[in-house]
Amino acid sequence: MEYNFQRIERNAKNKWKEQGIYKVNNDSAKPKFYILDMFPYPSGAGLHVGHPLGYIASDIYARYKRMKGFNVLHPMGFDAFGLPAEQYAIETGQHPADTTKKNIARYHEQLDNIGFCYDWDREVWTSDPKYYKWTQWIFLQLFNAYFDRKLNRAIPIDELIATFKTEGNSQYPCPGDDSIHFDTAAWNAYGEKEQQDILMHYRLAFCGYGEVNWCEALGTVLANDEVVNGVSERGGHPVLKKKLRQWYLRITEYADRLLQGLETVDFSEAMKEMQRNWIGKSVGAQISFKIQDTTSNIAVFTTRPDTIFGVDFMVLAPEHDLLAAIATDAQKQKVEDYITYVKSRSERERMAEKKISGCFTGAYAIHPFSGKAIPVWISEYVLAGYGTGAIMAVPCGDERDHKFAQHFNIPITNIIGEKYKGEEAYSEKDFTLVNSDFINGLSPKEAADKVIERMLAEGFGEAKVNFKMRDAAFSRQRYWGEPFPIKWENGIAYPLSEDDLPLELPHVDQYGPGPDGEGPMANIEDWKANHYETNTMPGYAGSSWYFLRFMDPKNKHTFASRAATDYWNQVDIYIGGTEHAVGHLLYSRMWTKALYDLGYIGFDEPFKKLVNQGMIQGSSRIIYRDRESNIFIPFDRIHDEFTLEELQSLGVKSIDGWADGMHVDVNLVDGLELNIEAFKKWRPDFANSKFLLNENGKYLCEAVVEKMSKSKYNVVNPDDIIAQYGADTFRMYEMFLGPLDVSKPWDTKGIEGVHRFLRKFWRLYNDDAKGWLVNDEAATEAELKALHKSIKKIEQDTERFSFNTAVSQFMILVNELSDLNCHKRAILESLVQLICPYAPHIAEELWAQLGKEASVITAEFPQWEEKYVTENSKVYPVAINGKTRTELDFALDASQADIEQIVLANDVVQKWLEGNAPKKIIFVKGKMINIVL
RNA sequence: GCGGGUGUGGUGAAAUUGGUAGACACGCUAGACUUAGGAUCUAGUGCUGCGAGGCUUGGGGGUUCGAGUCCCUCCACCCGCACCA
């Protein structure tokens, strides 16, 4: 019987479906295991072969854990709100709800094709009102809570209000505006509006104002990467900074706990490092500088208060509030021109800029200790959102300040001493301060303490911890997102009552922006009449808590019952790409912490272990055409001179030697060889083009590795691969491609090897002509050894997510069993169980053929036995001066003296010794022998 | 600019702890079988040299009996940088 994967896979899938074999219950005597994929955004393009990489890994692991006796939760859903569906709606008029539904159906089909063991009864869509009811509900919990800095956790805001009534806010500095101070009497005297405005500055979800990239022509807000050189990527319209009303999450209050929490989770060091850097905790001081001839003070944050006497100038962000007040008349025009320039620059461009730019404001600050006048500049490299939006510049100790001073000829004070040579800044801290008044002779560390002490005493500065992380912008002026459960009346935001949730997204017919930078919701009469918030929530709202909903997806009374969240607890393994390192992962960590603080769940980190998968890139094919003559030139001849005969045979006189590259559909190319006829069919506009060939009569394309995308015609659809080779081959090939966590280009050619392997595996059981081969003979020692070593290796590799080496071990084992001509049930039954997580369909078929009633999915993972895997001898490499020259076989319990004697007597060793005695013999038991001459 | 990652044969890669570099595959070469082969099987395949051997893990330097692995330094490429999700 042949390996008919189409029939086998269809039957297996039907069987599993009929049996509802992937249904997971919330109560079980088995230990629980929760393994989760980052759920996808269902884009219109469907899945390409890169998407399932992580899903296959988690599926293998989930099946493995199940066979190891765990109750495994392995759900899937869709992150279904988002911008692409809305943009598609604007272009085509199709409602996002309809296209999303269609896309999800397609994703479903594709995922099922691959044979994943999801419990689809637990599926969630973030765009489903039954789901986003609870997204809105959690938002209200955040809205109705503040962060108590003394208790270091979220507390219901009602408790804060009670405190304000009896003692004002002296014990509760306002996180949103630290200038707000009031006592009991003042609080009680405030009207509702004033009270609510103050509370807004405390809430964990709050409304404020923030700058965005505003494109007037498109009437919309743009992401940084949609802005190129100050104009919109689409259409090239001007983009300016604009202040808009925005909702935020006060994630900065959780900064310290987000840092500490990293100590308790199993993420890669790189991932933790990225999160730490994003949070960007730095310890230093905030110092206030008086501005000469004004009443203004400018506060700066510095990590180096010890360098206070090296301050030669100050730099403000061009957006700094006090700029208008301090710029002198003489400089005003220049300052305004510079601000205009900066307004057109995205934050990304400003940070990446190598060219130094800036503008003197005409103002001088007064050095708080020395009284020296310090010129105040503005420059784009200082960002308004970081620290106080102003820095004290110490050129001798900071390289960027140094370059700035050199560029604008600002004199540099040396407080470092000899270690500062004048050519570049000295930023190390191993020196003794000079030119620094009362801190002369001190180390930077000692000086910093002393400076802070003195500033505190004199009242113009204090020690301060600063975070690079900013509060998370939580609103979008868009349609396709969760509506905020908020009503505005007289400028006060009133939360809807829980009973009014979900506040459903109204149906609209057009998706264009509303007036004054508002979103499409502002165009809806009913919505406006009800005074509902017109912003919607951003894409990450729904994805910040979906892992909780999977635990209890149908619950109508709460987002997930406490019993369910207590049972499933943390996600044991979370698989996804590193691109979510600082966005989604930080937000969901914060939401989890807030829900924990408010008593809704019993754990404050969502993901116990994080596994990152790499990206599968596309391998594009490029062809080159000479524009003049309409002739295509093969890539291997792109720099050749062409003979007259060749050109004449194509009916042209010459080609100008300059060819245009164009992407060609990778499906029309075999390796690098273009199928010219297929190409002409694909692009009828080139049906009359001529093709030069290389000496083998082929037209070869160039191969370029880049992101898989429709526009580059390099997308490979898993459905096509599965139709040709089957899901089991596809699954194993994706794993065989390389380590899970590295990026690699897709190459369809290599899949043959894995497919051949599965056919070879099949032939251990079935012969095309003779039929069923499995017999009941007793297994030999060699067969048992091969099997048990493989079980051990594959188990270990699966545990450490080294799926590529596990697949290779399957190949080694099947090669060995084929060579041994082994068709014994005693071996082959275990082999089916062993391969089941990797290739479940073929396993199911063979399991049935072996006469098993129950599905192989419910079988156990095979156990390896120590006695079959222990070796009692080892072939040692014998090296001379570290270079292996020969090999010798020794028993593992042989004594070193015996081994040395035999080694030295060996012919090859004798030859290299040339009669001399060795200086040293290194013997590492079980590893190697090295003779040093 | 800042942060993170990756560099090993013609290609994807392996080497889990400092101990035989290139397992397992793709591709290629030769052969067997076959009406046929895009099936299957056998042998070979890092580079170089007739050979003993020499060289080889992005470049350079170091530590070590021994380095792909540790340290220093330089280079190249990929990803993220807050409204893509």
Image (cartoon, helix red, strand yellow):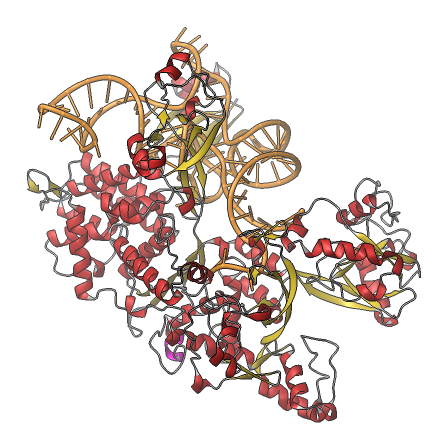
Mark yes or no: residue A377 visible.
no
Position of residue A34 in the picture relative to residue A330 (left or right): left
Residue at the spot x=92%, y=66% of the render?
A293
Above or below residue A601? Residue A257 is: above
The location of residue A398, given as percent across then percent down, is 77, 49
Which is more toward the observer, A24 or A130?
A: A130
Above or below residue A246? Residue A872 is: above
The location of residue A393, given as percent across then percent down, is 81, 54
Q: The N terminus of chain A is located in which quarter?
A: top left
Residue at the spot x=15%, y=55% of the render?
A11
Residue at the spot x=10%, y=55% of the render?
A851
Which is more toward the observer, A167 or B45?
A: A167
In magenta stretch: residue A565: yes
Q: Main secondary structure of the magenta part?
A: helix
The location of residue A620, given as percent across then percent down, is 41, 38
The location of residue A476, given as percent across then percent down, is 53, 67
Which is more toward the observer, A608 or A459?
A: A459
Above or below residue A475? Residue A224 is: above
Which is more toward the observer, A151 or A129?
A: A129
Position of residue A68 in the picture relative to residue A183 (left or right): left
Q: Which residues are magenta?
A: A562-566
